[in-house]
Every structure is written in structure tokens, then in C-alpha cells.
Amino acid sequence: VWPGSPFTEREVAKGQRALLSRMEAESSVLLMVHCGPAGVSTTVSSTADNTLCSEDVREHPIESGSPSLRSVLSSKTAQARVVLTAHGHTHAGVGQTRLGRIPVANAGSLTMSYAFSLIVLTRELRVPDRHSRRWRVSSMQQLELKGCNEGEPLLLSGAEMFVRSPSLRTLAVVVFLLVGVLLVHLVLRGYRANGTGHYEDEYACLGGRS
């Protein structure tokens, strides 16, 4: 419906399968893509306009997902390794769903609808080998900074929205501080030398390890 990618679906699927095949068997994969998989609610546009604020419903919803990504995620390899698939592209498809056992999240568009997601990943605790402990999604929240009828038009550029929205500025500061604290924690507490001059992270995925 909206062409524009320089790659065909076949090329996309080939690249995605090659990427997953290079992962170690015990890896936990967080997949972040622009376009989500076909056939799930988060890639269906049912509003007349591509926003959450339209009052008109399409008689024939637009399927904007990728068939090739759906095929890749439906494989046993992906179902075993992919912890979460996060995507955008479909502004009116904000929300969460599943494809098989894989959670799929469309975080939304801040510039189109002021929507965003908070997703918490937790590592399994009862596996003796830390490299075999899978990550899992322990919670997903869908939030909106502003409603459709709160006066200010929603179709703003990213710069305009940042300047006009105190809530967004506050959120940006909080996220910046949290990222800074996390980085300091990882540097001071989470790394150890492995004898080769490289480092292994006890908590996160480095070099293909989970």
C-alpha cells in the first residue's frame, strides 16, 4: 500500500534469517524493526487517518505488516530465541499483541498521537548457568502524554512537540538520568575482565551472548 523500501520481502526475509542464524543457541533476542509482522493487530490501520484521534473507521482496514517478518518470526528458531519484537510504522496500530509466544509491541508515534510504551525485561533466576537464563517481558504499559481533545493539535514536528510539551521535556530528563545511572552501574559493577582485554556483562547481552 505504501511502497518505499529499497528491499523486496524476499530480501528482507533472507537478511533476517541470516541474522538469527548467527546468534548463539542460548541467546535472547530483542528484535527492533521499523515495520512489524503481518497478520497482527499492531500492523492493522483501521482509522480513516493514520492517527489515534480519527473518529472515522475504514470500511476496509489497511494491512501494513511485513509477510516476510511474520514468516521469520513463525519459525521454531525465532519462537525459541526472540523475547520481544518492537516496531513502529503503523501509527494507528498502537498497542501489544503476540505472534505465537513472541510479544509484539507497537510503541506508537509521539509526534502523531503522543503515545509511547514502557517495557520491562526480567531475566530468569532459576537456571544455574547465567548464560542460559532467558530474558522475558515482565510488563508492558501503553501510555499517552496527551489526549485527542486537550486543545493542542497533535500533528506537530518532533522539535515543536518537545518545545511545547512540559511533560515530554520532563520525560526526556528522567530517561536521560536513568540511562546515565544504568551506564555507571554497568561500568562499576557489571563488568569483569575475561583475560583477553574484552569484557563480559553479567546482566546484558554482549557479543551475541545473553
Image (spheres, helix red, strand yellow):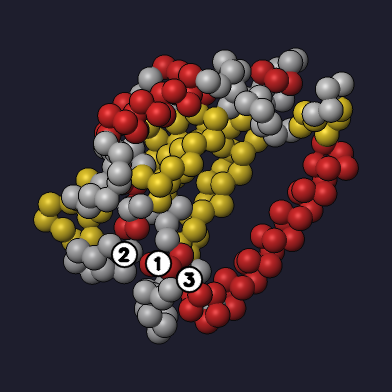
User: Between disc 1 and disc 2, whose residue precedes?
Assistant: 2
Q: Residue at x 55, y 21 (%)?
A: 23
Q: Is residue 182 above or below residue 101?
A: below
User: Between disc 3 and disc 2, whose residue precedes?
Assistant: 2
Question: Which residue is tagged 1?
Answer: 113
Say what amino acid the circle numbered 2 marks. Answer: Thr
Question: Which residue is tagged 3?
Answer: 158
Residue 98, quarter of the rendered image:
top left
Residue 152, quarter of the rendered image:
bottom left
Which of 107 and 16 lies nearest the eye of the viewer? Answer: 16
The answer to whether 31 appears left or right of 95 in the picture is: right
The secondary structure type at the circle numbered 2 is loop
Say what amino acid the circle numbered 3 marks. Answer: Gly
Which of 141 and 104 lies nearest the eye of the viewer? Answer: 104
Q: Residue at x 61, y 73 (%)?
A: 169
* Label 1 environment density (alpha carbons within 10 Å; few <14, some 14–19, many ≥20): many
Of labels 3 and 2, the one closer to you: 3
Cβ–Cβ under 8 Å for marks 3 and 2: no
**Residue 175 seen anywhere in this rendered image of the structure:** yes
* Label 3 environment density (alpha carbons within 10 Å; few <14, some 14–19, many ≥20): few
The answer to whether 108 appears left or right of 168 in the picture is: left
